[in-house]
Amino acid sequence: MNIPFAESYKIKMVEPIRKSTKEERLQWIKDARYNLFNLKSDYVYIDLLTDSGTGAMSEQQWSALMLGDESYAGARSYYNMKNALKNILGFDYFLPTHQGRAAENVLFSVLVKEGNIVPGNSHFDTTKGHIEFRKAHAVDCTIDEAFDPQLEHPFKGNVDLNKLEKVLKENPKEQIPFIVLTITNNTAGGQPVSMENIRGVSALAKKYDVKLLFDSARFAENAYFIKIREEGYANKTIKEIVLEMFQHADLATMSSKKDAIVNMGGFVCFRDEELLKKASTFNIMFEGYITYGGMSGRDMNALAVGLDEGTEFDYLETRIKQVEYLGSKLAEYGVPFQRPAGGHAIFLDATKILPNVPKEEYIAQTLGVELYLEAGIRGVEIGTLLADRDPDTRENRYPKLELLRLAVPRRVYTNNHMDVVAAAAKNVYDRRNEITSGYKIITEAPIMRHFTVELDRVK
Ligand code: F0G
């Protein structure tokens, strides 16, 4: 008999979670104005809202915390982080920030100006928010295959090089501060970008003399997929692949809450010392002094260890196989989702699961509420609420896909939890003909409304 796959760790500390009754959940979600962000975490049984900052740190990371140097300037922990970034990503210069969006804020404060164009592959919502806040425009150049959920494609996160070249050709280079390559492509379903595509984007960036920025939140998962799926990489280590990927980047922003497996942290990497100096002023204004930038010494230490562990094959294999396991259960039950399974999450195809809910009534959000009511599972809407309004017309932007993301925290849940999630999704799918209406907005913020929006039932 073949020996089955199992996790590359054992568990040393546990945190109890509690089931609730359907009656309790009906009341709680109503009190939360049908916004899953408004729920107390104690009201959630299995929390798949995000994989960001929700991972379990290792014994090595916890012990690194104890060695944190809390000096205001020049802390040892800063140098530990600097060494890790040099060794693993190959960058000489960096600024620590408290999380990924802070890294965007610091960098974009230097580079993004009103009227600018920023092409990329499905810019993440905070990235787009920071671009649009500066009255610049994000242009999505993701390949069309990404918008066909049933289509199996190994690198659905890729940039369509023709779309990108059109943007680069039609706009003066002074108007394009950089191209953003999001690895993995979160919004398109946690889908990877191939090394070939990275090389192609990099060649276009060079041809048109435009900088290339990696939004690196899940870079290690991306490297894992390159190793597994792309010809020529099977025998390379994850760390070798990561170094090769980052050779093509002029700049990188990072939310360390993902692939560096810490609860809080981020950074910006630079090759150009002049740009580092300009950004340092904004870092000092918004984040903190340049050798801590919103992070404690303890956190910088844990981050340095996390980057190292997060780029080890065994860890990544365990992680990604768990997401694949959830995908295989859903496939067995016929529940439609973005294929193939993503690195950090499964993205349920809400339009297919709830075919009777009108798009004006927020289909993916409706699915999110139903899954919560079914079994206390919290996902997150990646649909019309997230797509927000057009900044010029203020009309709702209807995205190509209405998805409910089920993001799996790193090293936190077992496959038994994944079984519960899959069964609950099946039950919602089985009663799809009874779910014919969704929600309407009561109040919303002018930008990034999904976090705080308040909703009510249409019927
Ligand atoms: N870029 C990507 C691709 C992200 O997924 C995120 C965060 C950020 C930037 C911003 O980083 O949260 O540290 O400020 N994504 C989380 C998520 C929130 O749930 O996918 P942050």
Image: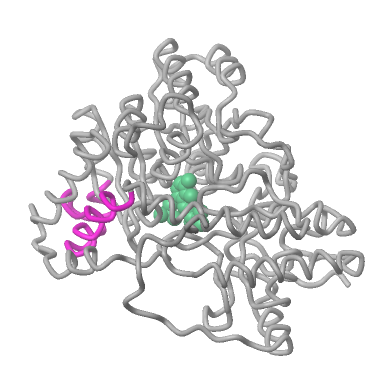
* Residue 447 as seen in the image, left or right of residue 316: right
Q: How many marks?
A: 0
Q: Quadrant of the C terminus?
A: bottom right
Q: Residue at x 56, y 64 (%)?
A: 49
Give residue 238's quadrant in the image: top left
Q: Nearer the viewer, residue 257 or 195?
A: 195
Image spot of residue 338 (x, y percent): 68, 46
Image spot of residue 80 (x, y percent): 14, 51
Looking at the image, the residue that sits furthest to the front is: 1
The residue stretch that appears in magenta:
283-310
* Residue 125 as seen in the image, left or right of residue 20: left
Q: Is residue 332 visible?
A: yes
Image spot of residue 41 (x, y percent): 52, 78
Give above or below for 386 relative to 21. above
Q: Examine the structure image and report whether residue 172 is included in the region drawn in magenta.
A: no
* Residue 176 as seen in the image, left or right of residue 94: right
